[in-house]
């Protein structure tokens, strides 16, 4: 039974058992001397709204949203932040009366991990991002705000990369060249190579040339807990020594949501250390 005196939060998904969010948010709260009740909610496919309605009726204050419900949350929200509008998806909600405020902190979490945790500034650097699905879409504006010299989106289905490049140019406040290309059209080497495709979820190798890795570059896989994915192995075989997965992004997007809900931004160092799976 939840403690009725505590503010209630949850993560909703299907499946949900694997979610680290309860661990992360409970650790954040403890570290700053707060107590919250944070649970996992399994919603049936097609049953998102009913489960969220019931959670709100029971006093729920906010939710994280994971697969496959980020589009359902987008439709459910009454007030979409620009980050959610640009991503076309929602990963955090805050409930206030009839209002459902919605955000997407994945992109800002990624950039915070790159720049702050991994000490990899993006300004003036060539950045390559693999994939043209939801993960890439959510990352585009936060990446461009760092003012790389160029951002290249590469995808098997070229038209999707071109569409995202056009969308990014249209909405970005900064003038950075953004290109959408197929894998065989990528030219030159990049300082930061981000795998935002879903290839690592199925242990597949994107059709990427090892020539894309510049000396000293960072290769970053947005998935987490999968060790050396085929993408990271390709980078390692190309003598890239700076390899990272998305554990820091996971912790940083959670910290953004926590700060939005609770008014205090927690430090992520301990959570990242506890969730890190060695890249081997
Ligand atoms: P997500 O929301 O995780 O981004 P998505 O919207 O389904 O998931 O998009 C998946 C992305 O991963 C797509 O860009 C897909 O490429 P295509 O559009 O060409 O299908 C990409 N992807 C999936 N498997 C891949 C693989 N083995 N190699 C390269 N790209 C892959």
Image: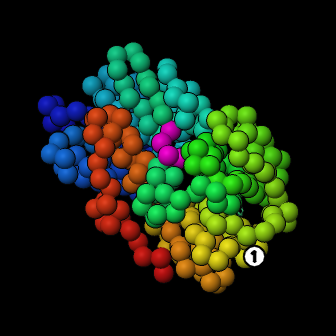
Q: Is residue 194 visible?
A: yes
Compared across the picture, whether 235 is left or right of 67 comes to right
Residue 98 point in image, percent of width and height? 39, 15
**SS assignment for the magenta stretch, majority:** helix
Magenta highlight range = 104-108
- State the image quarter where residue 169 is shown: top right
Compared across the picture, whether 247 is left or right of 57 comes to right
- Relative to 100, is 181 above or below? below
Q: Residue at x 58, y 57 (%)?
A: 122
**Residue identified by numbered label 1:** 211
**What colour scheme does the image use?**
rainbow
Q: Residue at x 48, y 57 (%)?
A: 115
Per the image, is 105 magenta? yes
Per the image, is 206 magenta? no
Viewport quadrant of the N terminus: top left
User: Does the numbered disc 1 mark a residue whose Cβ is under 8 Å from ligand 1?
Assistant: no
- Relative to 270, is 101 above or below? above
Q: Quadrant of ligand 1?
A: bottom right
Q: Residue at x 55, y 34 (%)?
A: 84
Q: Is residue 45 visible?
A: no
Circle 1 residues within 10 Å: few <14, some 14–19, many ≥20: few
Residue 113 point in image, percent of width and height? 46, 57
Compared across the picture, whether 131 is left or right of 18 comes to right
Q: Residue at x 75, y 76 (%)?
A: 211
Residue extending furthest top?
98
């Amino acid at each position: 039974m939840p403690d009725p005196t505590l503010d209630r939060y949850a993560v909703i998904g299907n499946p949900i058992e694997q979610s680290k969010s309860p661990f992360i948010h409970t650790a954040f709260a403890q570290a700053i001397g707060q107590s919250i009740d944070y649970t996992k909610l399994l919603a049936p496919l097609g049953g998102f709204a009913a489960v969220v309605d019931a959670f709100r009726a029971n006093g729920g204050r906010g939710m994280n949203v994971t697969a496959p419900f980020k589009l359902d949350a987008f439709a459910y929200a009454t007030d979409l932040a620009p980050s959610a509008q640009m991503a076309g998806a929602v990963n955090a909600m805050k409930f206030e009366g009839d209002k459902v405020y919605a955000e997407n902190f994945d992109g800002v979490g990624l950039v915070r991990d790159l720049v702050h945790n991994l000490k990899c500034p993006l300004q003036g650097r060539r950045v390559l991002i693999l994939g043209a699905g939801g993960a890439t879409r959510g990352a585009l504006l936060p990446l461009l705000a760092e003012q790389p010299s160029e951002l290249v989106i590469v995808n098997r289905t070229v038209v999707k990369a071109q569409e995202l490049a056009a969308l990014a140019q249209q909405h970005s406040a900064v003038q950075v060249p953004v290109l959408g290309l197929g894998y065989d059209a990528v030219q030159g080497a990049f300082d930061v190579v981000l795998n935002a495709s879903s290839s690592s979820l199925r242990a597949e190798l994107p059709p990427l040339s090892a020539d894309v890795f510049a000396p000293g570059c960072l290769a970053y896989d947005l998935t987490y807990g999968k060790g050396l994915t085929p993408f990271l192995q390709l980078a390692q075989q190309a003598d890239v020594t700076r390899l990272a997965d998305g554990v820091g992004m996971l912790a940083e997007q959670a910290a953004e949501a926590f700060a939005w809900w609770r008014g205090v931004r927690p430090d992520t160092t301990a959570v990242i250390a506890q969730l890190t799976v060695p890249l081997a």
